[in-house]
Amino acid sequence: MKLSRIILPAIIAAASLAAPAASAAEPILIGRRGCAGGVENSAEAYREALRRGFKMIEGHVRITADSAFVTSHDGKTARLGGQLVVEKNTLGELKAERYTQTREDSVTYSGGITTVAEFLSICKEGGATPVLHLKKFPKTCDIRALDLLCGVIDSATDPKSVLVLTSIPEYVEHLQAVRPDIRVMFQAEGKWAERLEWCKERGLDIDMEDKYATPECVKAIHDAGLKIAVWTINDRAGYEGRGLDYVITDLLTPDR
């Protein structure tokens, strides 16, 4: 037998051990809070994300004083020119406000509060996966709010089409116990290593801020059989060659 026939397989095996775990060459882009083409978490931003070709769209979830679910990042609307607190005001009061925001594309947009039901319907009509990014609910409703939210999901869309993103382990465990038909992703941030085995046991893909997604981190997550989502990356050079599975972005436009 020629020596090359022995050496070549050994070289290939060594190279595959050293290489990062396999991942899609092009990550799936997730429209962050809709996209930069509208007030964040507004119906206008979600519809613009669909026009731009996003197949996954993120919306942050909070609950109002009258137990309505809305998409809003901050608990206070002052950041967008409002005067209300989401959990202390009713849906009607919040709907009466109009917001303005100058986005990353340097354009100023206007818009209003959007309910989770409206967000789910927009995604359903556009064939996009809604990513419900749960903010922590008030202690007065907390875990019970998850069951109410599941009711909204059931009434608006196919639960299997929804991805819930949360940094709260109790929310993960409750949803997986009572609603295994709803997919959940865990926002681990800098605690990804200590939570990796826990995520592996539960089959949870992992989300984190870009600064935590080192090559060692990406490889460890892939070696665990999981996928990694990273926020926020707004240029293609920021993810090329890194083996990321999902990129949450304001400005990038998906290849249709």
Image (tube, rainbow, N blue to C red):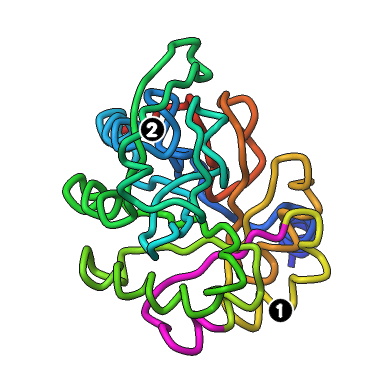
Q: Which is more toward the observer, 245 or 102?
A: 102
Horizontal side of 165 relative to 91 (left or right) equals right
**Residue 232 drawn above or below residue 72:** above
The residue sitting at 44% across, 25% down in the picture is 36
To which residue does mark 2 refer? 254
Q: Which is more toward the observer, 250 or 102?
A: 102
Horizontal side of 85 relative to 147 (left or right) equals right
Region in magenta: 174-188
**Label 2 crowding class (10 Å Cα cut-off): few <14, some 14-19, many 20+?**
some
Tell me which label, 1 or 2, sits earlier in the chain.
1
Mark 1: amino acid: Trp
Q: Which is more toward the observer, 125 or 233?
A: 125
**Residue 211 drawn above or below residue 118:** above
Residue 93 point in image, percent of width and height: 35, 44
Mark 2: amino acid: Pro
The residue sitting at 47% across, 64% down in the picture is 164
Circle 2: element type: loop
Gap in Å between the C-alphas at discs 1 and 2?
32 Å
| Numbered circle sitting on residue 39 | none
The residue sitting at 36% across, 63% down in the picture is 162
Looking at the rendered structure, the number of numbered marks drawn on it comes to 2
**Residue 174 drawn above or below residue 186:** below
The residue sitting at 57% across, 24% down in the picture is 235
| Numbered circle sitting on residue 198 | 1
Residue 1 point in image, percent of width and height: 74, 68
- The answer to whether any part of residue 144 appears in the image is yes
